[in-house]
């Protein structure tokens, strides 16, 4: 029998930018708590005052992605240096109705959203007469629809311009036909069905075309529901169920939290915060938000681990071993020989590399290996022809 051919990896095509240096943008109406949240989650100190349009220029910072496996590896190795995974977060100015036509601070902000890869959609459910609501009352579903519509209208504007060009070109150039058809399908969906691009059914070839547009309504969304301290403590607010139904219908996550409580916790000592949480039976939601944001971007990480360093290396789901190694050094991609891989759970269960080897849990993987979340990897590569290897 002829030797079996190694299976070829199936290329995964995901909606959105490739790469691992991706960002989540905080989007919502003015004065809903976006900057307050940004400050607490990234431990920053940008102005977050009680007036609409307090934020104008986008601010970017990062927060640590919590991971018990990383903690375990640190306890195990007690390394000299330790680097967790990070999520990049951008605080964007508030949007108002008509932003696509330049209302409020308008169009510039919509282009700030274009630069991010996923959206934390901040919804205000906290009542406070002293904090202006630009629509005059609390109604998060109305607010979500205002923002969603603005993003959609901006996409329509963009695609109508693209369509005007591509439609003509496609008449004479056959290879542009697919692009023209995809543009038309996207426009129909946005304009006629009032549906967002991310909710459509797209073939891999269409996704590749859509990814050249970077449409706002293609970006995945997580709804962050900003509650008052009182409501968060009693775990009740009349809007929660309604927002959940709205999000569930679209298959999108919602995370209730309180920016105000998180702010207070951040100002307390660790001991004080612990007591506050215990007395009020609450917990900070920031680690969960960070984790969900990271997952929403389709990011995962592998580890390099030893006594010098334990480090998380962020990659996009579906990344092959050479490109994953390229995060550490370009030599690992160009001169890739193999990746020696142990799954975290196997390592934890067996306690050492030697034991994993003995049990056949230490595997040599080739260039077609798709790196899994939590892999512990040792790359072997030709470095400038020298054949060196590196953890
Ligand atoms: N959960 C909450 N409960 C009570 N007050 C809150 C809560 N979250 C935020 N605030 C208050 O709301 C006001 C506006 O907050 P913030 O500046 O963070 O909003 P923003 O969405 O960034 O506004 P802008 O779009 O104008 O930049 C601040 O005074 C802040 O302390
Ligand atoms: Mg702000």
Image (tube, rainbow, N blue to C red):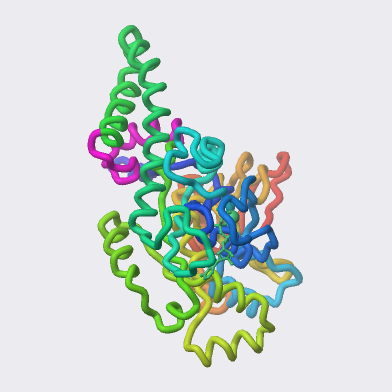
Extreme residue toward the right, this view? 80
Residue 67 is one of the magenta-drawn residues: no
**Figure check: 95 above or below 177:** below
The answer to which of 287 and 83 lies nearer the viewer is 287
Residue 110 % position (x, y): 50, 39
Q: Which of 306 and 311 is in front in this view?
A: 311
Coordinates of residue 56 in the picture (x, y in percent): 62, 46
Q: Is 188 on the left-hand or right-hand side of 253?
A: left
Number of callouts in the render? 0
* Viewport quadrant of the C terminus: bottom right
Q: Which residue is drawn at 40% across and 22% down?
A: 162
Where residue 157 appears, x then y in whole percent?
Answer: 40, 28
Image quarter for ligand 2 equals bottom right
The residue sitting at 71% across, 50% down in the picture is: 388
Q: Can residue 361 be seen in this view?
A: no
Q: Left or right: 5 with respect to 302?
A: left
The image quadrant of residue 50 is bottom right
Residue sitting at x 29%, y 26%:
184
Residue in the image at 41% along x and 83% along y: 234
Residue 205 image-quadrant placement: top left
The image quadrant where one finds the N terminus is top left
Compared to residue 91, the image places residue 216 above or below, namely above
Above or below 360: residue 170 = above
In the foreground, 52 or 294: 52
The verdict on residue 204 being magenta is yes
Across and down, in percent, residue 105 comes to: 55, 41
Question: Considering depth in this image, is 225 or 2 the residue closer to the camera?
Answer: 225
Q: Can residue 23 be seen in this view?
A: yes
Q: What stretch is highlighted in magenta?
A: 192-214
């Amino acid at each position: 029998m002829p030797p079996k051919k190694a299976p070829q990896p199936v290329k995964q095509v995901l909606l959105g930018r490739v790469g691992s240096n991706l960002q989540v943008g905080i989007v919502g109406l003015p004065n809903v708590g976006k900057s307050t949240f940004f400050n607490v989650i990234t431990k920053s100190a940008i102005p977050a005052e009680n007036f609409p349009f307090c934020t104008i220029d986008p601010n970017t910072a990062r927060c640590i992605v919590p991971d018990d496996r990383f903690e375990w590896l640190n306890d195990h190795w007690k390394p000299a240096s330790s680097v967790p995974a990070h999520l990049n977060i951008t605080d964007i100015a508030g949007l108002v109705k008509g932003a696509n036509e330049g209302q409020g601070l308008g169009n510039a902000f919509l282009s700030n959203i274009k630069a991010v890869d996923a959206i934390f959609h901040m919804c205000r459910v906290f009542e406070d007469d002293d904090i202006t609501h630009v629509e005059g009352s609390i109604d998060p579903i109305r607010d979500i629809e205002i923002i969603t519509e603005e993003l959609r209208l901006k996409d329509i504007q963009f695609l109508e311009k693209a369509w005007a060009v591509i439609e003509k070109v496609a008449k004479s150039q056959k290879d542009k036909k697919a692009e023209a058809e995809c543009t038309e399908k996207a426009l129909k969906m946005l304009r006629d069905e009032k549906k967002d691009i991310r909710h459509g059914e797209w073939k891999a070839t269409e996704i590749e075309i859509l990814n050249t547009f970077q449409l706002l309504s293609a970006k995945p969304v997580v709804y962050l529901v900003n509650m008052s301290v009182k409501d968060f403590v009693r775990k009740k607010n009349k809007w929660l169920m309604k927002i959940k139904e709205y999000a569930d219908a679209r298959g999108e996550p919602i995370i209730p939290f309180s920016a105000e409580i998180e702010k207070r916790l951040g100002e307390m000592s660790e001991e004080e915060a612990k007591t506050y949480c215990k007395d009020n039976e609450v917990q900070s939601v920031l680690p969960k938000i960070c984790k969900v944001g990271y997952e929403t971007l389709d990011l995962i990480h592998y580890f390099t681990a030893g006594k010098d360093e334990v480090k998380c290396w962020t990659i996009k789901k579906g990344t092959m071993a050479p490109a994953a190694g390229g995060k550490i050094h370009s030599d690992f991609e160009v001169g890739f020989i193999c990746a020696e891989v142990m799954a975290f759970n196997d390592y934890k269960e067996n306690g050492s590399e030697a034991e994993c080897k003995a049990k056949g849990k230490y595997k040599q993987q080739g260039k077609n290996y798709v790196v899994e979340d939590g892999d512990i990897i040792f790359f072997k590569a030709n470095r400038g022809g020298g054949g060196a290897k590196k953890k």
